[in-house]
Image (tube, helix red, strand yellow):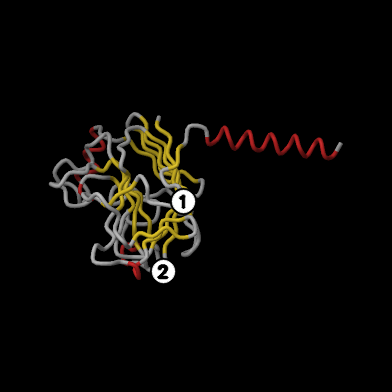
């Protein structure tokens, strides 16, 4: 009887996990950089290494081609993104989305929005409001800071649907805002991006992992188009 109950429980649990993951597709296969390239290039910089199922910006492996921000080959509009990240002490990075890839824009952050990835206490940027882990970088401060200790994995989610944006860090909703409306324009006008051409206006774009010159890891990256 116990065996039957245990089997039923396992089947139920697997079914629930399957339902939860339904529609999500991996952006990173855990083995290769297939589906990614360095921004405004066709290859992947040598600094990005696949190690133990994670994309690792390994500073020791940076060659003449450096690292550079990685971007997806594909663009996305409405989406639900899930990923995990961790940083080395004093490190800074970011998950950037709605990136418009075009030579006239020199970097992913020239057009894209960023969910901050950082060692809050070890990196100088962590002392700046709206520049801490989980923040919508330089735009909206997190409502709380459920970030893990440096070196531990954090689970993050970005949900963008019909202009409604939600950022989730370790299961906690930390940012909710609306994109592209009049209030959004005011938020952008009060940020460092106020005079940047077309910044934060693209409704489809690529997803990027930022090379900020510091050691960072990303894994379990998956997306569901909404």
- The residue identified by callout 2 is 89
Disc number placed over residue 58 in the picture, else none: none
Secondary structure category for the residue under label 1: loop
- Measuring 30% from the left and 47% from the top, which residue is drawn there? 71
Q: Nearer the viewer, mark 2 or mark 1?
A: 1
Q: Quadrant of residue 202?
A: top left
Q: Can residue 109 be seen in this snapshot?
A: no
Of residues 56 and 175, the one drawn nearer to the viewer in this rendering: 56
Secondary structure category for the residue under label 2: loop
Image coords of residue 122 (percent x, y): 38, 68
Image coords of residue 188 (percent x, y): 22, 44
Image coords of residue 215 (percent x, y): 37, 65
Residue furthest to the right in view is 1
- The residue identified by callout 1 is 30
Q: Quadrant of the N terminus?
A: top right
Q: Can residue 139 be seen in this snapshot?
A: yes
Image coords of residue 169 (percent x, y): 46, 49
- Measuring 80% from the left and 36% from the top, which residue is drawn there? 5
Q: Quadrant of residue 55?
A: bottom left
């Amino acid at each position: 009887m116990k065996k039957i109950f245990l089997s039923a429980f396992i089947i139920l649990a697997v079914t629930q996990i399957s339902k939860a993951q339904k529609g999500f597709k991996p952006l990173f296969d855990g083995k290769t950089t297939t589906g990614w390239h360095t921004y405004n290039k066709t290859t992947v910089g040598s600094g990005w290494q696949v190690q133990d199922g994670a994309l690792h910006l390994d500073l020791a492996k940076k060659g003449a081609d450096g690292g550079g921000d990685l971007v997806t080959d594909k663009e996305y509009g409405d989406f639900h993104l899930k990923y995990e990240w961790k940083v080395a002490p004093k490190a800074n990075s970011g998950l950037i989305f709605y990136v418009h890839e075009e030579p006239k824009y020199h970097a992913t952050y020239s057009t894209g929005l960023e969910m901050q990835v950082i060692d809050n206490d070890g990196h100088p940027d962590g002392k700046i409001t709206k520049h801490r882990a989980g923040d919508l970088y330089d735009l909206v401060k997190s409502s709380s800071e459920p970030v893990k200790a440096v070196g531990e994995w954090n689970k993050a989610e970005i949900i963008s649907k019909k202009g409604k944006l939600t950022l989730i860090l370790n299961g906690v909703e930390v940012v909710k805002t609306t994109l592209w409306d009049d209030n959004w324009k005011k938020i952008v006008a009060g940020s460092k991006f106020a005079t940047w051409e077309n910044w934060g206006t693209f409704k489809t774009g690529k997803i990027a992992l930022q090379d900020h010159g510091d050691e960072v890891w990303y894994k379990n990256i998956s997306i569901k188009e909404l």
